[in-house]
Image (spheres, rainbow, N blue to C red):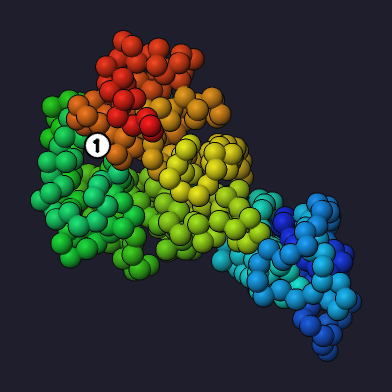
Amino acid sequence: MSKLESKRVLATYLIETAYPLDYAAEVMAGEQSTGTFVKVPGETPELKEKHGARVVKITELGSVTKPSLPGSRAPKGDGNQYRQAIVVLSFPFDNFGPSIPNLLSTVAGNLYELGEFSGLKLIDLELPDEFADRYPGPQFGIEGTRKLTGVEKGPLIGTIIKPSIGLHTKAYRPLVRQLAEAGIDFIKDDELCANPSFAPLEQRVKVIMEEIERAADRTGKKLMYAFNITGDIEELRRNHDIVLEAGGTCVMVCINSVGFAGTAFLRKYSKLPIHGHRTQWGAMSRSPLLGMSFTVFQKLSRLAGVDHLHTNGIDNKFSEDNKTVIQAIKDCLKPFMGGYEVMPVLSSAQWAASAIPTYNAVSTTDVIHLAGGGILAHPSGIEAGVLSMRQGWEAAVKGLPLEEYAESHPELSQAIQKFTKK
């Protein structure tokens, strides 16, 4: 057996089934490798040994009396207990090679549709080094992003252009000017705005970069703007080059819209950091027993080459709880494939007070902290909004209560009065 043939990919799943766990795990392994619903000619013991998936481990968690998802079927006379378990499968690397698309067809593929399961979620992946050889991963990461923005320590404070969609090209100029003069580190397009007729990307880039460069000439600080270049595959290079030629320092791509292969295609020629947005993430993750975990998603996103990755934020407006968000941030900061560092991006209903619980949970300032309304809606204006965010992080790092630090920092005090929920 060759070295490649002996390599395996380990995939870990959370499952729910009315069938015996051993049987259900074997169904998973067979469906995604050599088997089908009935034995066929050519399915020899030698072929199965070389190319079949194997059940590595089954850890039973308990049972429920009702199926978590519709469409499942139960064996006759045994439909009242739906067993939940962690299942680890091992797949021969030689079946698909170092290819993210073909890896996904194997470790996910048709598994979600199998009638034997009333729940199935891919929760982790372990990959051989050949994937790192094929995919170079993030080009800039945390260190490169800090170098480009000139922010040597502390979080990058940023915002999102609001309204999300509908602004005409000329409306960007005063808003970007104000943000640049306020000393903000980072701005990003909303994922809804890519290349609309009323604010075409090429025109938008020109206007925005003019304001950024003018502010940089005055202040010596050039903020990073993540332009949303999401589009069809043939558009990605053109859009990237528009930003590069205008002096931009970041591009944004919606990972799930262009796919991991599209993201990896962009990474091949990108000369700028890639800001990875996870739009559509809820469809993949919201059910606890369907889709994939962020642990898996961030690994594949890092392989594909993003330098920044959205994780959601503490006390956000979406469905994810704080425990899930904290784990997502920590996942991004864990070493993977020999490095592949990626900068977590915190967003959604964030303001100055979000800093303390975030820092207490993850003990790092290696984040991009985005606040839309938390900056733009500050009662004393944009500059005060930016200052309040910095002051929130200063209090966090110093271990001081927010209200105590606010006593000598009026911008923070005003933020507390404005954004604290009554």
Question: Label 1 belongs to which residue?
Answer: 376
Location of residue 182 in the rendering, given as x and y in whole percent from the top left corner: 21, 28
Q: Is residue 247 visible?
A: yes
Q: To which quarter of the image does residue 42 belong?
A: bottom right
Neighbour tally class for label 1: few under 14, some 14-19, many 20 plus, Cα within 10 Å: many
- Relative horizontal placement of residue 38, taking residue 160 as reference (left or right): right
Q: Quadrant of the N terminus?
A: bottom right
Residue toward you, 344 or 399:
399
The relative height of residue 47 versus residue 203 in the rendered view (above or below) is below
Q: For the image shown, how many numbered marks are present on the structure?
A: 1
- Relative horizontal placement of residue 168, taking residue 351 as reference (left or right): left
Location of residue 341 in the rendering, given as x and y in whole percent from the top left corner: 52, 39
Q: Is residue 345 visible?
A: no
Q: Amino acid at mark 1?
A: Leu
Residue at the spot 25% in from the left edge and 31% down from the top edge:
378
Q: Quadrant of the C terminus?
A: top left
Residue at the spot 49% in from the left edge and 56% down from the top edge:
281
Residue toward you, 200 or 198:
198
Location of residue 360 in the rendering, given as x and y in whole percent from the top left corner: 54, 24
- Relative horizontal placement of residue 264, taking residue 375 as reference (left or right): right
Location of residue 84 in the rendering, given as x and y in whole percent from the top left corner: 78, 58
Residue toward you, 394 or 305:
394
The relative height of residue 178 versus residue 412 in the rendered view (above or below) is below
Dot 1 lies on which element? helix
- Residue placed furthest toward the bottom: 41
Residue at the spot 15% in from the left edge and 62% down from the top edge:
198
Residue at the spot 83% in from the left edge and 82% down from the top edge:
43
- Residue placed furthest toward the top: 408
